[in-house]
Image (tube, rainbow, N blue to C red):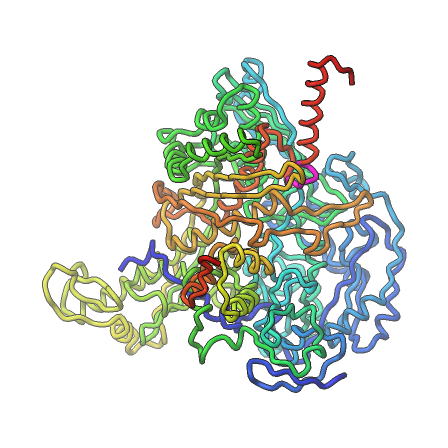
Amino acid sequence: MTRIQLNVNETIHDVEVEPRHSLVDTLREGCGLTGSHIGCEHGVCGACTVLVDDQPVRGCLMFAVQADGKDIRTVEGLDDDGAFNALQQAFHEHHALQCGFCTPGMLMLATWIVERGLPVDDNELREIMASNLCRCTGYRNILRAVRAVLDASGQDGAGA
Amino acid sequence: MTLIGKSVPRLEDRELLTGTGRFAGDQNFEGQLHMRVVRASLAHGRILSVDTAAAAASPGVFAVWTGVDVADVSPINLRPGSALQDLEKCRQHILAQDIVRYVGEPVAVVFADDPYRAEDAAELIWADIEELPPVVGLMDMPGEFAPGVSTEPAVLVKGYGDVDAAFASAAHIVDCELSVGRHAGVPLETRGALAIWNDDENRLEFHAAAKIPHTNRIALAELLGLELDQLHLFEGHVGGGFGVRGEIYPDEVLVNLAALRFRRPVKWIEDRMEHLIAANHSREQTHRIRAAINADGLILAIDDEFWFNQGAYARTHGATVPVVSATMLPGPYKVPAYRATGRIRLTNVTPAGTYRGPGRYETTFVREQLMDTIAAELDLDPLAVRRTNLIAADEMPYERPFEIGGKPIIYDSGDYPESLARFLDHVDYDAVQAEMAERRASGEMAGAAIICFVELGGDGPFDDVRVEMDTDGRVEVITGVASVGQGVETVIAQICADTLGIDYAGITVTHGQTDRIARGQGARASRVTVMTGNATHKAASGVRGMLLEKAAELLQSPVETLEISDGVIGIVEGLGEGPSVTVAAAAAEILRGQNAPRIAVEESFENDRATYSFGAQLAVVVVDPLTAGVTVERFAVVYDIGRAVNPMLVEGQLVGGAVQGIGGALFEEFLYDETGQPLSVSFADYLMPTAAEVPDVECLVLEDSPSTTNPLTLKSGGDPGITGAGAAIAAAIGDAIGRPGAIKRLPVTPLRLRAILRGDADRKQEKNNAENGVST
């Protein structure tokens, strides 16, 4: 067992892990943060997407020991004392989730897109969001929700 | 206040958006064991021995079971009424007894204190299996499932009218062979189960149940030898259902049996590879279909023989998929005489059950390709052939003289030609066709097509709902249904709030808890909004009546003069001024002096008829002539739902279903090699659409034809997105390559389409050669 330190949503977690433990298993079992979901464990579906040092990462493809000392952000860190942030609110209003299993990964991927601050046109948005699978929504409303937040923050991609 | 018909946001979203949901993997019990299943690695074989010694000695291992440890447990039953002929003889044991029949069949289980250690130990188990010859292909010669039981255990025949006479007098006869590949629902959450023996209550508790908790409770109690009150099921969040999640599989029985025997909590979470080889597959069918036609393209009769690949065992659904296939194939068309012969075949691949739109996705593809083939052979416009055969508005209600599940098929309402006309207008189909013709003239392989279908759902036999209100006016609706993510809580709260005249947002909708209501039918067959919705309306009306009566007494005003609006009971607008009382105050008055904390009204809604609705879909595709890759440029759905409780959620179902269906049309397929080894065992092999492969699906939700089967006039809405998607994509590709009816098999992979295009190219070359006098 190895002792590592994860700074998850600005809270320090000291956890003991085996070298083979994945980051998402450790977040869920070691840190008690079950919002990041496990859909395939081979890096395709993206339900476990979290931000590691502000970059989107498949939580199932990174070992916990590789994240030692890093800043990690998960879906549990998005709301402000229960108040939705802009992306959560947009997902709610645009009916961008049904079963909600892929939603945490979609939200974290979209968080990265929004926080980059760059203009994103519809094609690029579709291409990036195609990193993650959703089996319920058919994607339309997810794209609309992220688009609405990007537009509101001036990242409308016009002329990009 | 009218909440029915409003696109209000969902009550379910908060937990799901903040990462505080309770999916199977999120739940834990103190001292729990983790189960890992060891699965057969051969498609067909005789178990000689299973060596568990190393696994049993592995760190953290509590117990190891093989078939002999569970030999006293009977195989998993088919649901009552779903068996046919010898199908019941082909049930599956929870661990293989002597013979394994598919790769993925449970052979042993390990219980350990940690999931990683359970998996370590499972890898140490060695099953010595003597290989037997497998039956892999659906059309291979049947063999024996067991001595005296054929791998074609049942043949069903459904039909009506004089088919032979129609063929004898027909101007034309068209025939084709059409196949749909093996798909599955593949929810993003894999299966999972937790079971715990509750000593205080003297009962077993199965957590992370899904889909049909009440139905499964009865079946599981019987399997485990428990009295019904010794078992309760509890549903948490469910990461997608689509028919596959929530059936009783060997794995779920093993978890419950272990918790019962060990008196210790047991947790099992399936991994993705297991899911793809062990959870129900669906769809795979081959049809040989013939149609007798008159000179105008009117169908006089259809004669269809089809083969359905049930896989290695009969599962809980029994013959559901082939029965629905046989009875729904005629769809929206008149078809005066009809005969379907369905051959249920067992093969050494993963067993099959239902997948969203069961029997309709497949047969809509078959029927609509038949329509295109008729058009091509008679040189008619494909849309004109469909119009010629559509059931007319004045023929409603339209009865097909055979039965499904003991009930007659009666299409309750609809104006199919008018709905189609509105759709053509909405998508501007003339302009679409003109554009396609222009693009084809400039050398592009672009095409468009419209296909039609009929959807069914909303069937009974019953649903119970109890509406309760406390002294603060807070409402709980207790139902016997389940949620698989479709928005049950919101829709039921809307109907309850609409009936009571209160806000929907404060209403709690309880589902999937067998200890809260005695009976339930769960979330299957697109039935929740219709059945539970009407039961909710009935029970909430009872509460409303009590509130009005009490208010009449308090306000000294006759009941007829009162209404409830925004949670306040007062004089009906226009009848003058008067005092008012809040719903909460009236509830408190009703409960004053009573020994109950809540007003409670329980009602049953019973219904022996399903709802039937018309839908059509447009697909626009372009084919890359070099790679034979297909790009879907546009996809649109029209659906006459009668009355939409929440149009935004209806659209959500249509869009999501359409994209799933496009997956099955172009990408998704479980393939096997000739020895029965599965080739589609990861998301790198079983390809589901991402946002990059699909357009934004357009929807036209019509409310033109209210249902006549229920007081709220609702129709089903879960499956119409997927039902026509395979048919629409195939027809559009046929148009794009200039050969309507050319697509004979789904999914239309580049390999298969390239073979069709090559065939075309070869024929063209032969023709040129012949014209130029070159011998080949």
Q: Is residue B609 visible?
A: no
Q: A63 or B230: which is nearer to us?
A: A63
Q: Quick one: quadrant of the N terminus of chain B? A: bottom left
Residue B392 versus residue B97 in the image, above or below = above
Q: Which residue is nearer to you in this view: B125 or B318?
A: B125
Closer to the camera in the image, B663 or A148: A148
Q: Of all residues shown, which one is farthest toward the front?
A: A159
Q: Position of residue B7 (x, y in %)?
A: 36, 57
Is the residue B252 above or below the residue B144 in the image? below
Q: Is residue B751 magenta?
A: yes
User: Residue at the left extreme?
Assistant: B576
Q: How many marks?
A: 0
Q: Report the front residue among B15 and B37.
A: B15
Q: Quadrant of the C terminus of chain B?
A: top right
User: Is residue B518 located in the magenta-colored stretch of the structure?
Assistant: no
Q: Position of residue B573 (x, y in %)?
A: 15, 60
- The percent position of residue B509, horizontal first and vertical second, equals 43, 65
Where, by quadrant of the figure, is residue B276 drawn?
Answer: bottom right
B320 relative to B478, above or below: above
Left or right: B230 as drawn, with respect to B422: right
Residues in magenta, as a range: B748-753
Dominant SS type (magenta):
helix
Q: Quadrant of residue B737?
A: top right
Question: In this orientation, does residue B546 appear?
Answer: yes
Q: Position of residue B475 (x, y in %)?
A: 36, 69
